[in-house]
Image: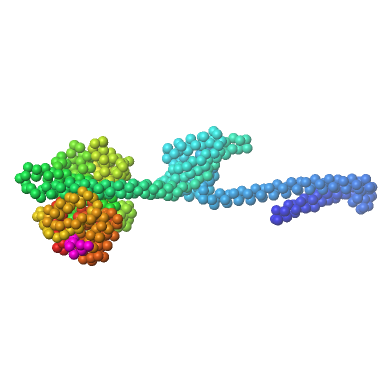
Amino acid sequence: MKGKIIKRTGFLDSIVLTGIGIAAIYWILESFMFFFLSPEANIIHHLLGEDMFETLTRVLVLCMFLIFGSHIQYNVNRRREADIAMRQQDEKYRTIIENIEEGFLETDLAGNFTFFNNSICKILGYSSEELMCMNNREYTNSENSKRLNEITNEVRRTGEPAQVKDFEIIRKDGATSAIEFSVYLIKDDKSQPTGFREVVRDVTEIFKAEREKKKLEKQLQHSQKLEAIGSLSGGIAHDFNNVLMGMQGNASLMLFDIDESHPHYKKIKSIERYVENGSSLTRQLLGFARSGGHEVRATDLNELIKRTSSMFGRAKKEIKIHTNFLNKIWTVEVDQGQMEMVFLNFYVNSLHAMPEGGDLHLLSENVVIDEGSAGNLKLKHGEYVKVSIVDTGTGIDKEIQDKIFDPFFTTKEKGRGTGLGLASASEVVKNHGGLIDVYSEKYKGATFNIYLPASDKKVIQEKRLTRKILKGTETILLVDDEEMIIEVNKDILKALGYKTMIARSGKGAIKIYKNNQEKINMVIMDMIIPGMSGKEFYDNLKKIDPEIKVLLSSGYSISGQATEILERGCNGFIQKPFKLTELSVKIREVLDGK
């Protein structure tokens, strides 16, 4: 409505004011001229002319002046309105440009700033006065400056705009930011290039979020791979331990009937050592598996490291081992067997890094991780025991340091191992609530820092397992689905003096126990039983006899389902493969309530 009123007022002004004004001036001037030329004429003649012809002539000329004046005023008004509209349009676009989040800038062909909005100042960190004296090559490094020059040259050559993503700039404070921008060519009235126009967007936070997303996706994939390996390795370890149990059981039975003077004694003892070596391999596999948890106990890490390093040092005399232990080291709760494997894996890794020999430094200390450090180390804040393993070997390239704990990655040559050691060590430490941190430079050795949560429990000195075979005469129900395990365990129990009943499924075992409850003194059960879970089977036994005595036997470590069964009241646990002596002691502990 306002636009129409302005136009109508301008039109009326041009006709009435301009036209009448010019016509009136003409009429008055001509009347005065006639007055001086014909003084004898009266006032009517002065105003209208002497005759009709002069009167019509004056009216005609008056109309011409009226039209001419109206046209002049109309054009003046249109130009004035156009100027106002243009100023309003310029102000509108300037307001938009100054308030958008994206940066907007114009440069000449050399890259010198000629115009920019406030967002560009915020993105680059410079004031408007500083930017006006700058060139757009000054806020990036030489490599990106060259890249920008190539982009603008291409835009100038083709006249086509260019889209640029992931361009790094350097802010005034020295911080780097990521931007994406579009470049357009500016031309004058003669279509000659005069400069460039750019629309800039700060994507630093977006790129950070994308990098974090990729990092999380990578961690998820890594976790899924480890979970897959865990499931696979746990099953393999369980089945392999059953095979080892058959070998160990038969070796124990043969040793039961002979003494050291027998010609086959040493060979049978060698079989036992091989079984122990195989068992250590399965512990390494179980380090990956969720089912391969820990038989944790309060432990002095200094003693554990002394024991493992001493054993390693005797075998590898070309490595000089130096120790620096804190005397009052905090206690940790760990599976000692798995932690021994962890340390031995690191010793072997250092050995491979020092083929000509070198120095291996082992250090321990108590550390407190505060909330600030916890985020960097990805640990919960609290008290930890830190063990540092430092070698003087060839070091590790920065590019592969984040891969060395990946079970799918190895730098070892064919025939020199799989690289599984560090991966299993990392998983074991993680399963204990800890972390392994690595620092290394090529040809400058490597430092591995192991953090394990401290415990307020006291270290209990482990009693030496008696080598005496303990016998009995009770009746034991043996529950297992592996024929090989049933046969060897039945023979072992017979050799120890026990009477045995055999069950190959959960339902069958429950039926046998119900029918022979008064005769059966104890049940030895495998954790995996056909027909029902180990927990369900144990709960059913407890319903029949709340005072029942049960020894849990499994190729898995004492974790997960095994721990749950023990927490329900199961009297003991023994891991396959076990020796005849170990089983004899465990049976007496359960039966005698020790």
Please provide percent x and percent y for residue 49.
Answer: 92, 48
Figure quadrant of the N terminus = bottom right
In this view of the protein, which residue sits in the foreground, 440 or 196?
A: 440
Please provide percent x and percent y for residue 461.
Answer: 14, 58
In this image, 178 relative to 272: left or right? Answer: right
- What is the magenta range? 515-522
In this view of the protein, which residue sits in the foreground, 568 or 413?
A: 568
Please provide percent x and percent y for residue 338.
Answer: 22, 51
**Is 517 situated above or below 88?**
below
Residue 85 visible in this rendered orientation of the protein: yes
Residue 456 visible in this rendered orientation of the protein: no
Figure quadrant of the C terminus = bottom left
Q: Is residue 244 magenta?
A: no
Please provide percent x and percent y for residue 325.
Answer: 17, 52
Which residue is painted at 92% across and 53% down in the image?
43
Which residue is painted at 45% across and 49% down in the image?
206
Which residue is painted at 51% across and 39% down in the image?
111
In this view of the protein, which residue sits in the foreground, 34 or 311?
A: 311
